[in-house]
Amino acid sequence: MPRLAAASLAGTAIEFYDFFVYGTAAALVLGPLFFPAFSPLAGTLAAFATFGVGFVARPLGSVLFGHIGDRRGRRPVLIASLLLTGAATVGVGCVPTYGTIGAAAPLLLVVLRFVQGLGLGGEWGGAVLLTAEHAPAARRALWSSFPQVGPAVGFLLANAMVLALASVLTEAQFAAWGWRVPFWVAGVLALAGLWLRSSLAESPRFLEIDDHARVPLAEIVRHHGRLVLLTAGALAAGYAIFYAVTTWSLAYATERLGVSRPVMLGCIMAAVVLKGALTPLAAMLGDRFGRRPLCLVGCAASALWMFPMVALLATGEPLPMFLGIAGALIAFVTMFAVIAAYLPELYEPRVRCTGAAVGYNLGGVLGGALTPIVATALAERGGRVPWGVGAYLTAIALISLGCFALLPETRPVPVPVVSPAVD
């Protein structure tokens, strides 16, 4: 289990590095480079729109790779999704800007972002299922939480790279070529991840299935449609909160408040380190008290914290901004630490890869794709404190709370040990 968990964590870290490095670039440089005819605000919105394309592609990727995972096994999904995402990310780093090839530049950006989303849509389901289906039932949430640490590691890698480049390069150098370097590094990371995953064994639970679903998506729609919609709605809050504090807040603080790029990236990265460290601890609570209670607590805490969070962000001071972001991510991790165990347990094994991945990635569309765009527009129309952003995130958290309330608990019940009878 430690070797399997480490390989899954490394793979998700690499693929989410690819995804996050695009979000950071969208917040910082892609607007003026690929949409120069727009105003600064419109350029940022357009860059965030290309960011959202990746989320739209993720459910399609979950259908494609979920079909492979349910029909051919979880392991092939891990290899194919890693290669696809890595190739698309390197491609983004090679796209000429609008000043070189005109309108073809943003078009290529959208296409590559779409391909990147396809790969990531398959990644989560394969990595989580391979870990969850190997793990002992009593510690399933704990072992399954390690792939969930991967996004935090990927985010830190992506932003550490950008922060280092921004610290040693001038603004002109970073805009000219520096922003491309993190995308090129993705190719090296993808090869490393491929090496790590090449020795993993197939899921024993998949090998036990005698009757594989012929068309997994058809069975999901016919028999589990309500469950997919509830899980998507339940996960929307987590996505909205995470991308609000890691993507929108970066653009808001640097463009509206005049906070320096290294300071804001440092605040976000410190909070993400805390989130990653707390993930296994929250998962252990999920094994002890159940998946659903932690999700309900996390959603409720999110709804209560969104207004204080935006007020702390609006100060423009490092410590209050860190506290605002850290509080939001603690509420987030309370929900998402147990999701890697919770979602697979909700679906029967023969359609588990498709069902869990589609529900997870539809939540990304509902909560993650639009949040940077909506939050940017709401912050522009408000005063110094973006109360509209707080209201928007609170509303999503309350909707997700209602969806979690309608989902069942799935924590395995320990089998009591029966003492032998004594004559």
Image (cartoon, rainbow, N blue to C red):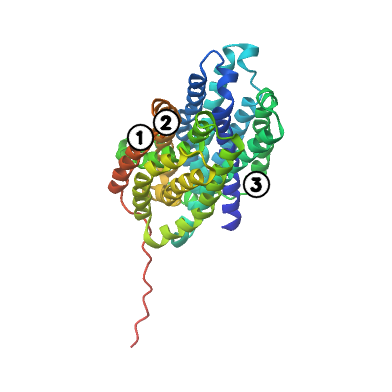
Quickly name the residue at label 3.
196
Q: Residue at x 65, y 26 (%)?
A: 93
Amino acid marked by disc 2: Ala
| Precedes in sequence: disc 2 or disc 3 | 3
Direction bottom: furthest residue: 423
Which mark's residue is nearer the viewer, 2 or 3? 2
Q: Where is 141 relative to 419, above or below?
A: above
Quickly name the residue at label 2.
375
Q: Secondary structure at mark 2?
A: helix
Q: Secondary structure at mark 3?
A: helix
Q: CA distance from mark 1 to mark 3?
A: 41 Å
Residue 4 in percent (x, y) is at: 58, 53
Q: Residue 318: which disc? A: none
Q: Secondary structure at mark 1?
A: helix
| Precedes in sequence: disc 1 or disc 3 | 3
Quickly name the residue at label 1.
392
Amino acid marked by disc 3: Leu
Closer-to-camera residue (388/10): 388
> Can residue 207 be spotted in the picture?
yes
Q: Are marks 1 and 2 in contact (CB under 8 Å)?
A: yes
Determine crowd level at label 3: few under 14, some 14-19, many 20+ residues with C-alpha closer than 10 A.
some
Assign the C terminus to one quadrant of the image.
Answer: bottom left
